[in-house]
Amino acid sequence: MIQRIQSIYLFIVTVLSVVICFYPYAEIGDRELTFWTSGIYQGLCIIIPLVTFVAIFMFRKRILQMRLCSFAAILMLFQAAFMLISYYMEDCQNCHLCFVAIVPYINIILTYLAIRGIGKDEAMVRAADRLR
C-alpha cells in the first residue's frame, strides 16, 4: 500500500534527489559545482529519482522493491563519492561545501529505513501465510 512508512521514506528520497539536481553542492570562489557538470553526475541525477519513484509503486512485489532500494542506495554511495572526489580535486583556498552536499547521506539513511520497513512487511506476510 502506498501509505506505508517506507513509501513515505522513498518519496522523500525522490524529492531530495530531484532537489540535488538544481542546487550547487560546492562553491569555489565565484564558480559553483553542480551535478550537471559531468556525464556521470547527470546520469545519477536522472537514475536515482526514477529508481526510487518506481520502487514506491512496487509495494506488491516486496522483494523487487527491496532490490530496487538497494540498487538506489549503491547509486547514492557513488553519487556521494563522486561529489567528494570532484570537490577535493579542486585546488583552491576559497572552497566550501553547501547544504546539498549532505543530502546523499540523508538519502542513504532514508533508503536503509525503507529497506528495513519492506523487510518487516515481507516477514509479516510470510508469517501470516505460514499460519493459514
Image: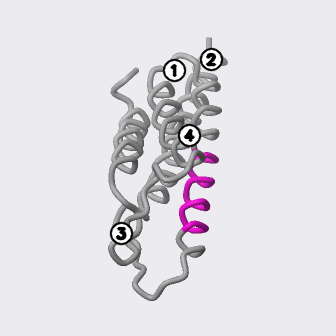
Q: Which is more N-terminal, label 2 or label 1?
A: 1
- Which three-letter amino acid code belongs to the residue tagged 2? Leu
The x and y percentages for residue 77 are 60, 55
Q: Which mark is residue 76?
A: none
- Which three-letter amino acid code belongs to the residue tagged 4? Gly
Q: Residues within 10 Å of mark 4 (few under 14, many from 20)?
A: few
Q: Residues within 10 Å of mark 3 (few under 14, many from 20)?
A: some
Dots 2, 3 in contact, CB < 8 A? no
Viewer-side residue, 69 vs 3:
69
Camera-side mark, 2 or 3: 3
Q: Which residue is mark 1?
A: 58
Cα distance in 3D space between marks 3 and 4:
21 Å
Residue 102 highlighted magenta (yes or no): no
Residue shown at the point (46%, 49%) measured from the top left: 36
Cα distance in 3D space between marks 2 and 3:
52 Å
Q: Which residue is mark 3?
A: 98
Which quarter shows the C terminus? top right
Position of 19 relative to 82 (above/below) = above
Cα distance in 3D space between marks 1 and 2:
25 Å
Viewer-side residue, 79 vs 4:
79
Which quarter shows the N terminus? top left
Residue shown at the point (49%, 54%) measured from the top left: 109
Q: Which is more N-terminal, label 4 or label 3?
A: 4
Q: Which residue is mark 4?
A: 43
Q: Which residue is mark 2?
A: 131
Among the 4 quarters of the image, the one containing residue 63? top right
Camera-side mark, 1 or 2: 1
Position of 72 relative to 132 (above/below) = below
Q: Which residues are magenta?
A: 73-86
Residue shown at the point (49%, 53%) measured from the top left: 37
